Image: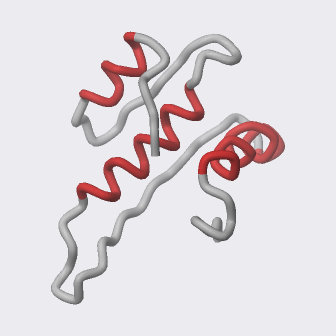
Amino acid sequence: MSYFPPGPNAAAFHNDDSFVRGLMGPVGSGKSSSCCSEIVMRAIKQKPWFDGVRRSRWAIIRNTYPELKSTTIRTWQTWFPQNVALIK
């Protein structure tokens, strides 16, 4: 995966280890792509359990489900098609 933060706010977001974080910005500023890459980068860094499987849980929150579906899920599927990462 080739990803570069789209700006200083996204770079600061990636460097923050707070348990809860948010990312705000104008339409088209790369917020959803930054969050998708953050999920994968953090999941890869997760220490495997005794069985060798990395387990990680995430929440992505939008104002409405249609908003989530039309923007964030679409972005996720652009970066990670269903044959790579299935959304349940």
Q: Residue at x 28, y 42 (%)?
A: 19
Residue at the location (35% across, 48% down)?
Answer: 41
Measured along the vertical axis of the image, is residue 43 above or below residue 8? below
| Residue 29 in picture, x, y percent from top left | 60, 16
Q: Quadrant of residue 84?
A: bottom right
- Give the residue furthest to the bottom: 51
Asked where in the image residue 86 lies, by quadrant, the reply is: bottom right
Residue drawn at the location 25% of the way across and 29% of the way down: 16
Name the residue located 81 percent from the left edge and 41 percent from the top edge.
70
The percent coordinates of residue 83 (x first, y second) are 66, 70
> Which x, y percent locates residue 15?
25, 28
Q: In terms of image quadrants, where is residue 44?
A: bottom left
Q: Is residue 69 above or below residue 30?
A: below
Give the quarter of the figure containing the C terminus. Answer: bottom right
Please tell me whether residue 69 is drawn above or below residue 35 in the rendered image: below
Q: Nearer the viewer, residue 59 or 51?
A: 51
The front one of 21 and 87 is 87
Residue 39 in the image: state x and y as whole percent: 43, 48
How many numbered discs sit on the rendered protein? Answer: 0
Q: How is the image coloured?
A: secondary structure
State the residue in front, 79 or 30. Answer: 79
Does residue 16 sit above or below 9 in this rendering? below
Q: As drawn, which residue projects farthest toward the front?
A: 2
Q: Horizontal placement of 62 versus 57: left or right?
A: right
